[in-house]
Amino acid sequence: MDPKGKGSPDASGLARVGSTFPDEVMQIVLALLNSHRDRSSVSLVCKNWYDAERFSRTHVFIGNCYSVSPEIVTRRFPNIRKVTLKGKPRFADFNLVPPNWGADIRSWLLVFAARNLCLEELRLKRMTVSDESLKFLSLSFPNFKALSLLHCDGFSTDGLAAIATHCMNLAELDIQENDINDKSGSWLSCFPENFSSLEVLNFANLRNEVNFEALDRLVSRCKSLKVLKVNKNISAEQLKRLLVHAPQLTELGTGTFLQDLTSCQYSELESAFNKCKNLKTLSGLSEVTALHLTPLYPACTNLIFLNLSYSALKDVQLAKLLVRCPCLRRLWVLETVGDKGLEAVGSNCPMLEDLRVFPADTFEDIAHGVTESGFVSVSYGCPRLRYVLYFCQQMTNAAVATIVHNCPNFTHFRLCIMNPCQPDYQTNEPMDKAFCAVVKTCAKLQRLAVSGLLTDVTFESIGRYAKSLKTLSVAFAGSSDWGMQCVLGGCPKLRKLEIRDCPFGNAALLSGFKKYDSLRSLWMSDCKVTMNGCRLLAKERPWLNVEVMKEEGSNESRANKVYVYRSVAGPRRDAPPFVLTL
Amino acid sequence: MERSSDKLSSSTSSTLSSEDEKSCALNLKETELRLGLPGSQSPERKPGLGVSLFGKDLEDMTNGFSPSPLKNPVSGAKRGFSDAIDGPTGKWVVSTGNGSEVDLGKGAALFSPRGGNGGKSLGGLDGKSNTQLPCPSATPTIKEASTVPQSPKPVQEKKSQIPAANEPGSAPAAKAQVVGWPPIRSFRKNTMASNLTKNSDEAEGKAGFGCLYVKVSMDGAPYLRKVDLKTCKNYVELSSALEKMFSCFTIGTCPLLLCLSVSLSLLHTHHTTFNTPTHPITLRFCRIILMHAEYKSTKLTGVLFWCLTHARGQCSSHGLRRQDGLNESCLRDLLHDSEYVLTYEDRDGDWMLVGDVPWGMFTDSCRRLRIMKGSEAIGLGMSNIISI
């Protein structure tokens, strides 16, 4: 750490105060500050504090990789060791962003290496990562400890092999839900035989079989292993062997339980789970039937997070499992559990804070699935609910009003009625009253995703009442520009706004041009915005990046996909031909 | 043109149905070529008209065929050969609506089903599967952005149209799908697909259980698409879906190529023994196309190439030569002129021609698809053609 010396001249009066503050104290205090916001505040006080803060910062979080350049980041924070980067707009997850859009980690790694950063942790979300980048990473940073890739693309298991081979101090390898070219499972065998520092290993979403013996030896060696999430190729018998070597696990992702267990295997598995007293998170469990869940019961007593979102469980099976999880705070399920399953949730999980119900089969109309009544049952039983993601086929205004009345503490309310523009199925009215109730009742609401048939009334309410709202996702909603204008005119804390298929046009887009300085980003696709509107915005606000994605054969004057974000790095230098920066 | 149409009529007149003569009323509006994004709806199109392959008015169009609105009202303006496959009868037809003089008619059966197997021997060309083409990337919003949010009806209406367009007794189509909606990541969709198919006690007899997205790239196109293999039940549906997706890139090319290529591969795969009356029909068909290729430039030569690929497999080369007067150099020319070929990358990373293996095996092993230029596809097992 190299702070400016005490007594350096500074014009501001505050600086004089700051300069009498002993550096040693400053260092200690700053070392305790972890929150990015607090650190930002500190850096704004005076130059001394700015410098003290920047040299002591070890972790930087960049919510939009194009808002800043790696050169600027490394110049300001020369001592960072942990970097978190998010790349593509969120709607890239739903195929709304063409491939090769960008957000490549490569340029960042090159700069980090050139500046001799002592990089230890890299957490990436929606970035493009190539095998060459992974290899470069593994070779350039000898202290590298943690790699987490979430919803990334562009790499294959060869890249993982490079990481396993070269990163001698690796403690975390977390590969989740990426678009990975899964060539083989041989990457796991690349960990050297004397390698033992692993604490987190998550390869649940990789499809190819790894060498089990290599995995077994790895787990035995790594005494600090806390998180292990294996993929589907690991059988119950193999899982038992792993558990015997790692009873200290706090998070477990199982493989597949499909084969029938002999009674001997069954009891061995049960006793292995019995020894896992520290288990807080359980996931995996794909392809599992009721019979296979019983060995898990001993491990459920301290469970906080149960992720069944890949298990097609039915209500009875879920109920039996939930009875054994009294401490459950987070539950992710598939809609196969039905409303009855959700009633069981309401009855058995009084501590529940986070509930996510995912759809099972997205393109068929299914008779089962969840409705509004399941959600209402949960709200009666789980007053502490604050995060909900709910996919359903039908909903009513009255149900939502009841739900938020029971659970006024929502911070994240994401309701997805699967048919676009579907009204309240009982009254045939728009779903405006539902979301008005949500924003009026839930003062702490930070994230909202709306769906169903909605008019501008919803957006008027959002603009007026959603004082804490940071992220808003809108699809197939609204009646006119006025809706979006209300949101842009209200919502003082708004950071991310993503809109698709709404009748908002240039008037709406331009009404918010002052607002965009405080937004991380704005996404508008398939709305009524035109190129001229975007050009006007770009002219009004030259420091914003106003990007339009052109599609072949589309109307020349329409701007079908617009991505607006603030940036100190100027327009992108690596934009592909279909991205126009205005 | 008249000369060839006479020949056509004579070869297939026996199976011309009167119903189709009625429907072949001159309707130039219906022949109007429109560009919609794949899957966008052309609501003002009337159903009931056939596809015009060789119609007189085709000469006015750049890509040699007229769109048929009939089978799948949700899909875009362009249609291909797949629509010529008649629903309930499971027969191949080549029809020419719109008052053209070339009147093969909808009922014309150029490849009738194998004897005892009825409609099944064409392996999937049965009534159930071919008319209902879900659009994996349907975007009704492009044309209807103004209407969708304002009225709750359009999307639901669209869905109800699909069953209405069914031939009676055929399976319900997967409902119209908007790009990226509902907002579930492909990873989850694909994982659920493979999970659910393994849970055998969940079998409910539904078609298209789960989904399996693979990327599709086309040489020359600026971006890739994804197609859900589970929504297609056979190669024909796949080729149609692909054709719809990439039709905006194939102006000037014959999208029929894709349809025919895989469709005929299918024919080849499903043990078609050509020592039956259909054999001469096959070759006659090939000859027909070849003749028209003279007029339609090289676009249809790809079609012919594929016909011959698979027809040849069944008859002696000697017979082929004798009957059609074709020779090696002619084929080589065709090969070079053919526009696009559909290939896929299998689990081992090898690039294979689509259509060789049964559909089930294909969906299991296909990792991604590529529509590559015919000239590049020469290495992919085409050598048996050259060595006639």
Image (spheres, rainbow, N blue to C red):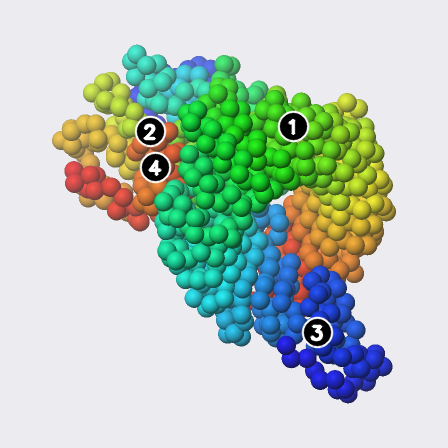
Q: Quadrant of the C terminus of chain B?
A: top left
Write the residue at 32% across / 43% down. Answer: B348
Establish whether labels 4 and 2 are both on one chain: yes
Query: Picture coordinates of residue B65 (x, y %)?
Result: 44, 35
The residue to which callout 2 is attached is B358
Q: Nearer the viewer, residue A212 or A86?
A: A212
In front: label 1 or label 2: 1
The residue to which callout 3 is attached is A27
Amino acid identity at mark 4:
Val
> What is the CA distance from the residue labelled 1 to the residue labelled 2?
47 Å
> What is the CA distance from the residue labelled 4 to the residue labelled 2?
10 Å
**In the image, A188: left or right of B318?**
right
Write the residue at 60% across / 69% down. Answer: A80
**In the image, A576: left or right of A372?**
left
Establish whether labels 2 and 3 are both on one chain: no
The residue to which callout 1 is attached is A323
